[in-house]
Image (tube, rainbow, N blue to C red):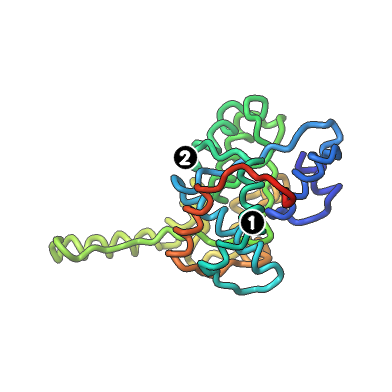
Amino acid sequence: MQQAIDDKLQKSMSFDTITEIFHRELKGDPVDPNGRLYQFGFTRPSSSNSGAVALVTMAFEFFAKERGRYTLRLEDLENPDFQAYLAFIKFMSDQSKTSTGKLAEPLMQAGYGGQPLTTVYIYEKLAVKLAFIRDANDPDGAKPMIRYPKYNLVSDHPYYTLRHGNSREQVEAAKRFKDYLLTRDMQLLALQKEGFRPVSTEITNAEMNQVFGDFVEANGLIPDLIKASQVLIPRQNGDVIQALIQTYDELGDPSGLRL
């Protein structure tokens, strides 16, 4: 299916691309030459960070389009065309999973025969892990094809040292542990074992290519973050994100002329 999307649409994967696929199928023009319907899934936004990230990406793409920077506003969420767009994606997609791991798990365990979804919106690290597991368990089987969305963002994993209620020795130990995690060897280990992008600037794209090996070409991994993100979404206001999630939860099925 992904190869058919690449060949027929010749567009970057984005929510605009996904809605075009859905609209084509509703008009009787499926993208898949075998007639298989496109199934797209992301996690429930009110329960999972990656689902909330998907919503931010949808909203930014809808309002920003080709602009590099845009800050979502509360009044944007009242836009009827935007609400119709969200309702359409909500109606046509699967958001039954409450965690990103649960969304990716069937692909890792049962393979593609046991997973009805065509495309899943997950973290890059899980996509890397999926590629490794699939290659190890079924090297001659279907391979996951990783496509980076045109509008992308980085989901950080911050490290906090809590001073309140802790002794000076505990705080010092926490700082030393952080320094240990940031060493070159540990950053490479996190990349090799879990697919986490290194935060150390000492690790080059060439080294990442070497660690990923054949998965770069075979699965579509892009070690260079700049190349992976055509448009990197800037940080958005937390209150607006929370309101966006609530707006999405309250939407019913799409109806009317905008469908």
* Residue at screen point 47% across, 53% down: 246
Choose mark 2 or mark 1, whichever is in front. Answer: 2
Question: Which residue of the protein is positioned furthest toward the front in this rendering?
Answer: 256
Local crowd size for mark 1, using a 10 Å CA cut-off: few (<14), some (14–19), many (≥20): some
Label 1 amino acid? Asn
Residue assigned mark 1: 209
Residue assigned mark 2: 98
- Residue 146 percent coordinates (x, y): 67, 47
**Callout 2–callout 1 Cβ contact below 8 Å:** no
Quadrant housing residue 169: bottom left
Query: What is the C-alpha distance between the residues marked 2 and 1?
Result: 32 Å
Whether residue 234 is visible? yes
Q: Nearer the viewer, residue 97 or 240?
A: 240
Number of the label disc, if any, that sits on residue 225: none
- Residue 84 percent coordinates (x, y): 65, 52
Looking at the picture, does residue 91 appear above or below residue 66? above
Q: Nearer the viewer, residue 209 or 83?
A: 83
Viewed as shown, does residue 92 lie left or right of 48? right
* Residue at screen point 69% across, 55% down: 14
Quadrant where the N terminus lies?
A: top right
Quadrant housing residue 91: top right
- Residue 139 percent coordinates (x, y): 67, 32
**Label 1: which secondary element:** helix
Whether residue 131 is visible? no
Label 2 amino acid? Thr
Q: Nearer the viewer, residue 174 or 53?
A: 53
**Label 2: which secondary element:** loop
Looking at the picture, does residue 145 appear above or below residue 237? above
- Residue 238 percent coordinates (x, y): 43, 64
2 or 1: tag closer to the N-terminus: 2
